[in-house]
Amino acid sequence: MKLAHLADLHLGFRQYHRQTPAGINQREADTAMAFRQAVDGIIAARPDVVIVAGDLFHSVRPTNAAIVFAFQQFQRLHAALPDAPVVLIAGNHDTPRSAETGNILRLFEEVGVHVASNEARRFVFPELELSVLAVPHEALAQAERPLLRPDGSARYEVLVAHGEVDGVFPSDRSTVEYGGAVVQPDEFGLGEWSYVAFGHYHVRTELGPRAWYAGALEYVSSNPWGELRDEAEKGVEGKAWLLIDLDSGRATPQPIIPARRVLDLPRLDGTALAAEELQAAIVARVAAVDGGITDRVIRLVVTGVPRHVARQLDHAVIRGWKAEALHFHLDLRPPSPTRSTGVGAPGRRQTLPELVESYLGQRALPAGVDREAFVREGVDLVASAERELAED
Amino acid sequence: MRVEAPGRVVYGVVLDAVAYEDLARPLDAAVHALGDPAAAGSPRDSIRLYTAAVLRQQPEEPLQPVPLGEVRMATDDDVRVALRMDAFTGGDHPTGIPIGTYGAAGLAAPVSLDADFLLGPEAAHLNITGVSGLATKTSAVEFFLSSIFQAFPARKGSVAALCFNVKGPDLCFLDQPAALSDEDTALYARLGLEPRPFDNVHYFAPCKPDGVNLNTLRTHPDLAANTEPLTWGLREVLEYAEVVLNRDDLDAKADAFIDFLDDRVVGKEFHAPELQPKEWKVLTFADLEAFFRAIFDALENSHRGDLWRTHHIATIRKVRNRLGNITTRAKGLVTDDGASSDLPWGAFADRAVYVVDVAGVDPLAQDLVFARVISKLREHLERRDLGVDHVVVFVDELNKYAPSDGPDTYVRKMLLDLSERGRYLGLVLFSAQQFRSQVLRRVVGNAGTTIYGRMDPDELATAGYATLSPATRIKLATLPKGELMVRHPHFTQPVFVRFPRPAVLSGREGVERFPPAPDLPFDEAVARQLRALDPGVSVERVRGLVGGRREDDVRRALARTRQARPDDAFSYFTACLGRRIEPERGTRRATVTPLRDPVDPYASQP
């Protein structure tokens, strides 16, 4: 008995300004391509049941293109796997805040999809000896939640839910999607189900025996860099959907080949570097990207860059990179402010020339500039200005 | 007694008395009466010699021998001065705590203890010795607590009491009034106290193994409102693992593995690439069992020997067995699923009594309760965030928990620490035992105030009582109910006082008036606990709701409801239980018509 678990498709997700020749946001098209690729893979793997664990769309009012595309893909699935039920639940992105908005997901019942959009439903498929408790976001957000327990009515009992399992998300929460209903691990009885399919967290994560977050099929959050970091920490490589053997409990990630790579380049430390030195280091870092930066989503963080150094960088080159990549973000971060004098300590306040001398003594300088002469010149300038003021 | 001499007054207390008559032998009276028994008993001249110990001299300096002078019986004021109570019962800031009356020849002079020496900071702790069943220990502590709550000055801060009920129904009815005799009522009036039960009492008792019926004699429905379960999960237990693991059995290797679990695994995100799954967050005993199983599976599959992260498999198995055993031996106190119901740490109320009833639980669980509760008290008092400034902890049966011989248990060490360091924190130990000589000397020795009730003659024959005069020892062996001998830092000699019966139901009376409810079936027991939060909850509604549910789920929902104490307890409980979702047959749609215009909106070419 095989189950396909995918989640967080976020169809209609738009990011950056690049468009396809057809005038579609490029990232929206990338997201759709990932889903198409997943459907291709599912059709090839021929699972007995397909589970979509929420956030099919990125918003409660998706674009017409996204709706039509999703309809086509589900129709394709149904045509290719007529005996495999498809169970779809609504995630927080699919769930309108007010009831009168209605839920677009019900449309997919017309293509044979079993949809739980606002209430939990327990679908039983006797011919597969399968029962699926489908718990959408709204059912978990209510005060009276459904009982998340198998009812013992079938040989294979599967729970599909969309929410935040308490204690699983990273502690800094920078990659956590807001609005997810929190579920305590003891609420859904790990180990009691044939499989637990969760959606909401975009990084593929094993929750326990026979329980997974499938993760998103693309980098569809506002913080893809945090997602990359979480993946690195968890040892997860790229995006995938999961093929589960319900008898053995084994989960096999089915990788999605991304339309483009999302890269967070290794950080540079710009502390005490002159603008020319920093420019050279940045150029080297960009040049070292395997396969180049063309059409990719890239970020380079440089720390310890004072504002005057940032202004002196070659921005024409940087604009070139921005044009070449789908998105190039040079994240120049100023040095963290440090206080070199004691607070509240008794002592004399510095005079203006002394203050200037102290500042110029630390300021980053272009290569080849004699600091001593530079400081002396600055101090002399201030002193002469003071003299002029006094004479006036 | 009071001796007056020119320029000096000496106060003393009689310790011994001897009568001298003109007969060398008792038989001489019969000989002189020529065998007439009636004449032999006729009055004779006698001299009585009283030996008294000096309590106080005025002026105190220079120290002088006791002068010859007229001896008078003491008055109330004399007793106050003799016992140096004038220093703390008068003035603008009195700190006296009445403990009874000193009586001789019709006198009933109130005697008070100094709160600074009873609850700190000058000295602290109180220890009571006496045989059981003669209104010595429990009754005295109940009365003292009532007196402290009424007389402890508010400017000295707030005070609460935490009592461990270790046997029978002794402390189970502190909130129920008792009928007092006129004599007792008059005694209360004399001491300036009101005879009333405690008006803010909270009871905590572990559950029975079924997880819903409480393991206490205080199960009468009328008493349910302030009786709450005491249940702990893995986190609470693991902090005190060494309490529940036999020291002889627990070697350094097992200790290290437990530390590893506590520091790195329990309640934390633990990443273990070699285990399946790789990410762990162990919160409950059930999680811990799964974690152990994963380690054993990994070791078995890897064929890499018997070591997992430097811990030998035998050590891991040993710790697993011991920890797993806790949930069996302390079932009802320790829960598998992590739901805990605890004392209100951080929200202790002034003049409130918290009774932890461990009378019916396994000794191992008792040790665990002692260790954790007192450690938590200490932690909170150190941080000054318990909610009160002083806590009186009452522990009976010190012979059992801090014996002078036997193994050095965690509980004994903890009681010793409490008695040695507690007063700096405001943590005051009121302890009681039958045989003081058999209690760890440093524990009783740290008690600033010592009380003796009716004593066992064998106990009085031990070395600790050698400083008492023979008459005092005889009096101690024959003390009537309600009388005590008191030693207090202000009193230079032990003083006998009489205290009134506490104004609360005794255990025996309480059990007669509020007989414990029989153990109820699961659903009724759940209903009873919910009724404590919302009296309108009926058994029928609860039965309809929990019928067919798993008991673990019901217990978890009940624990959450008790924790939240919502206005509408039943609705909250219902929500926690979760709605049952009825199955529906997934119908298959035979054919789906594709869209008429098959253009892919996301096709790469327009």
Image: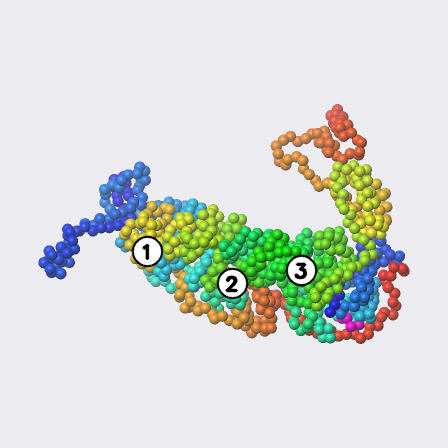
Label 1 crowd bin: few (<14), some (14–19), many (20+), radius 10 Å: few
Q: Which mark is residue B301?
A: 3
Q: Which residues are magenta?
A: A82-87
Q: CA distance from mark 2 to mark 3?
A: 33 Å
Element at badge 1?
A: helix
Q: Are marks 1 and 2 on the same chain?
A: yes
Residue behind mark 1: B458
What's under tag 1, amino acid-wise?
Asp
Image height check: is B492 above or below A24? above
Kindly identify which chain the residue marked by label 1 belongs to: B
Picture coordinates of residue B548 (x, y %)? 60, 73
x and y percent of residue B47 in the render? Answer: 18, 49
**In this orientation, which residue lies closer to the viewer: B467 or A354?**
B467
Q: Taking the image as drawn, is residue A165 in sight?
A: no
Identify the residue at image location x=45%, y=62%: B359
Give the amino acid at mark 2. Arg
Which color scheme does this rendered protein use?
A: rainbow
The quadrant in which residue B308 appears is bottom right
Give residue A238's quadrant in the image. Answer: bottom right
The kind of residue on which mark 3 rests is Asn
The residue furthest right is B606
Residue B329 tag number: 2
The residue drawn where x is 75% and y is 41% is A269
Dot 3 surroundings within 10 Å: few (below 14), some, or many (20 or more)?
few
Q: Which one is in front, B384 or A162?
A: A162
Q: Nearer the viewer, mark 2 or mark 3?
A: 3
Asked if residue B562 lies left or right of residue B444, the reply is right
